[in-house]
Amino acid sequence: MASSDVKPKSVSRAKKWSEEIENLYRFQQAGYRDETEYKQVKQVSVVDRWPETGYVKKLQRRDNTFYYYNKQRECDDKEVHKVKIYAY
């Protein structure tokens, strides 16, 4: 299977917040499953991240507008259960 054909094998929901969940939340807000799909669709090798926290800083949506994110946590506890975790 070519890297451009990567599809998830299963999906589950997040139960509690973590740094991984924070970044998934940001990708999913911008319309992507995760970093893998973002890199595949946008043909980029590196995602802009805050150096202090490692959180995603900026994402380009499919309609070419940008989402800019803060250095601090943006995924509130009440939003955590909405985050999907894909397994490949």
Image: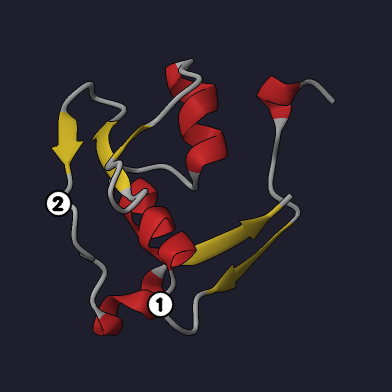
> Farthest front residue?
52
Residue 70 badge: 2
> Farthest top residue?
43
Is residue 67 placed above or below 52 in the rendered structure?
A: above
- Asked whether 14 or 58 is in front, the reply is 58
Q: Indicate left or right for 74 with 28 as reference.
A: left
- Asked whether 73 or 34 is in front, the reply is 73
Label 1 belongs to which residue? Answer: 17
The amino acid type, in three-letter code, at marker 1 is Trp
Is residue 56 placed above or below 58 in the rendered structure?
A: below
Q: Residue at x 45, y 83 (%)?
A: 16
Residue 84 badge: none
Q: Indicate left or right for 15 with 58 as reference.
A: right
Distance from Cα at disc 1 to Cα at disc 2: 17 Å
| Lower sequence index among marks 1 and 2 | 1
Q: Residue at x 70, y 34 (%)?
A: 6
Q: Residue at x 49, y 47 (%)?
A: 33
Q: Indicate left or right for 56 with 63 as reference.
A: right
Image coords of residue 73 (percent x, y): 23, 65
Q: Residue at x 50, y 27 (%)?
A: 39
Image coords of residue 11 (percent x, y): 63, 64
What is the quadrant of residue 68 in the picture?
A: top left
Within-10-Å neighbours for mark 2: few <14, some 14–19, many 20+: few
Within-10-Å neighbours for mark 1: few <14, some 14–19, many 20+: some
What is the quadrant of residue 12 in the picture?
A: bottom right
Label 2 SS: loop
Label 1 SS: loop
The amino acid type, in three-letter code, at marker 2 is Asn
What is the quadrant of residue 31 in the picture?
A: top left
> Farthest right residue?
1
